[in-house]
Amino acid sequence: MLAWLKWIGTGMGIAGALVIALNLPFSGWGFVLFLVSSVSWTVAGLKMRENSLALLNGVFTAINLLGIYRWLIA
């Protein structure tokens, strides 16, 4: 399961960055992709006992939730 979490986190992170970088009308959805990535990496970091990775991606999760709110909800 750990390998899957890491690959999902990597793939969604790449996809999210690409969607936002293209600045398309649906670019706000890049934050949803980033959210999946950051949650995946947070869980992977906790499972690997890599506290710095878990903390970083926990903060990214909060930032992505803010992006979702500002771009897609508000």
Image (cartoon, rainbow, N blue to C red):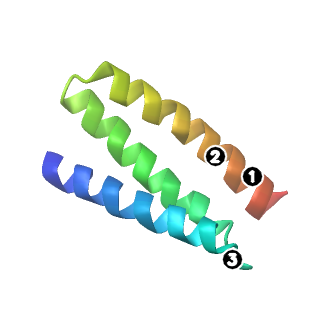
Front-lying residue, 1 or 54: 54
Q: Is residue 15 above or below residue 26?
A: above
The residue singled out by tag 2 in the image is: 65
Whole-angstrom CA distance, mark 3 to mark 2, is 16 Å
What amino acid type is highlighted by mark number 3? Phe
The residue singled out by tag 1 in the image is: 69
Using the image, tell me which numbered label, if any, was put on residue 16: none
Near mark 1 (Cα within 10 A), the count class, few <14, some 14-19 or many ≥20, is: few
The reply to whether residue 5 is visible in this rendering is yes
Which corner quadrant of the image does residue 10 belong to? Answer: bottom left
What amino acid type is highlighted by mark number 1? Tyr
Q: Residue furthest bottom?
A: 25
Q: Residue at x 68, y 55 (%)?
A: 68
Residue 24 image offset from top left, x and y in percent: 69, 78
The residue singled out by tag 3 in the image is: 26
CB atoms at circles 2 and 1 under 8 Å apart?
yes
CB atoms at circles 3 and 2 under 8 Å apart?
no
Residue 45 image offset from top left, x and y in percent: 28, 32
Q: Earlier in the sequence, mark 3 or mark 2?
A: 3
Q: Secondary structure at mark 3?
A: loop
Residue 53 image offset from top left, x and y in percent: 35, 29
Near mark 3 (Cα within 10 A), the count class, few <14, some 14-19 or many ≥20, is: few
Near mark 2 (Cα within 10 A), the count class, few <14, some 14-19 or many ≥20, is: some
Q: Earlier in the sequence, mark 3 or mark 1?
A: 3
Q: Is residue 59 above or below residue 51?
A: below
Residue 41 image offset from top left, x and y in percent: 34, 42
